[in-house]
Image (cartoon, rainbow, N blue to C red):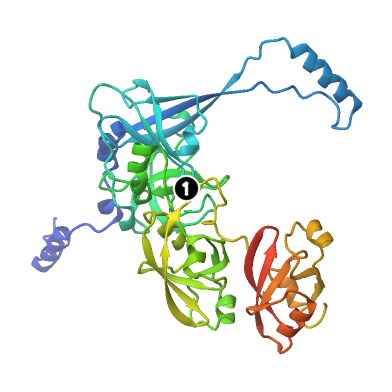
Amino acid sequence: MKQRLSYPIFLLLALLLALPLTGTAANLPDFVALSKQLKPAVVNISTAKKIKQRRPNFPGSPRSPYNDFFDEFFDRFMQNQPQVPRKQKALGSGFIISKDGYILTNDHVVNGADVVTVKLSDSRTFEAVIKGQDEKLDLALLKIDTGEDLPVAELGDSDGLEVGQWVMAIGNPFGLEQTVTAGIVSAKGRVIGAGPYDDFIQTDASINPGNSGGPLFDTEGKVVGINTAIIAGGQGIGFATPINAAREIISQLKETGHVIRGWLGVTVQPMTDELAESFKLKETRGALVAEVVPDSPADKAGVKRGDIIVTYEGNPVTETKDLPRLVAATPIDKKIDLGILRDGKDKTLKVTIAKLDDGGPDTSKLAATEKGQLGLALTNITPELAQRYGLEGTEGVLITAIDPNSSAADSNLRRGDLILEVNGKNTGNIDAFRTAVAKVKKDDILRLLVKRGNAILYTTLKAD
């Protein structure tokens, strides 16, 4: 015999069924529709370049007497033989950004290529021309001529991305054409050491060799990143260049084939809690100036070693990585306000930004970084010691040994470092060093300016 539901229970069930779904299925994007919509704007890229024929590896160790014989034989034998270069091939991805055939991809996909071939989603192939390249941001602009309008991938806003947001990648991993993978934004602002303007989007959408240069889409079908890098052996860890960074240079690549960037002329390093304490700062922020390039815009404006850059044209410089991107995007010859902390006091300097010379030293990169109560064995620098440790200059105190039982052993100091300053005081020789540390007490944090090879950096040392 069937039982009838009571009216209150029936009403409760009706209300529950009327509520909107909040489960995972209700929040999933329609990847099927997105794939159909976006695939036509994604292309596969194959490249070929000729490389010289390599000399064969003959048997024997490098010191084997047979090597000289075989080398001479090979040189004589091959002297009148035609040298047939062999081709090296590579695969990548890209996406169409204009109806007339402009395509964005990674620079490392096409760099050095003699022939670049673009394959559309309908399997037609066209030879592409490299219109512009930017090695620092790892971007390249290609152009194909099909005689018709092409489907375009719309550029989105990478600044608006949130960690946990769904994203989708389309590309050519391992030559598997038009492969679609999906995941979320795992992190933003990643610095992985790929270049001076690192600011990657990290995603767990599957990215593999061949995905390089392909688009990372948001759920609205807009490009928010260019898939660029992976961690060898890692799973679920891929990196994409934010599309906003690419958008800023596309017009330069199209018009001139290269990118012109601003130059400040400082080497900077991150602030640490210990360095902040040594500068008597209440918070750890800003970019610490480790070196100022002579006759650079910063030098002319009065920037000094030990200054902490905290604002640039009103924009906060919270971390060191913020500064290179702000400087690079500044028009040449523009005068900007540089906010610094010097001796604990705020100061504003007027700096006229110059052009970054790619042929010179890249100062936008980050700085590399007598036994007693400090646990250091020191000596005055001599020309012979300077040559041995690859140093320049005749002033400074050289670290020749570090006591393994001292706090110096746990510091960032190394044997062969040249100490130039202690807490802002010059240490051109042992006597000057002794004067600088004369009033040091146990557990004091010392701020040391150190020269290591060609790099100059700040570090700290806790007195035992």
Tell me, yes or no, if residue 398 can be seen here: yes
- Relative height, residue 140 to residue 427 (above, below): above
- Relative height, residue 111 to residue 221 (above, below): above
Report the side of 192 relative to 168 (left or right). right
The residue located at (58%, 76%) in the rendering is 275
Report the side of 271 relative to 123 (left or right). right
In the rendered view of the protein, which quadrant contains the N terminus?
bottom left
- Relative height, residue 170 to residue 267 (above, below): above
Residue 167: where, in percent of width, then height?
A: 35, 48
In the rendered view of the protein, which quadrant contains the C terminus?
bottom right
Res 75 quadrant in image: top right
Report the side of 41 relative to 138 (left or right). left
Residue 69: where, in percent of width, then height?
A: 87, 20
Q: What residue occupies the far right of the structure in this picture? A: 65
The residue located at (76%, 66%) in the rendering is 394
Res 392 quadrant in image: bottom right
* Residue neighbourhood size for the residue with mark 1, other residues' Cα within 10 Å, grouped as few (<14), some (14–19), many (≥20): many
Residue 21: where, in percent of width, then height?
A: 22, 57
Q: Say what secondary structure mark 1 lies in.
A: strand
Residue kind at label 1, given as amino acid type = Gly
Q: Nearer the viewer, residue 53 or 235?
A: 53
Picture mark count: 1
Q: What residue occupies the far left of the structure in this picture? A: 7
Say which residue label 1 marks. 238
The residue located at (52%, 65%) in the rendering is 299
Residue 322: where, in percent of width, then height?
A: 44, 62
Tell me, yes or no, if residue 178 can be seen here: no
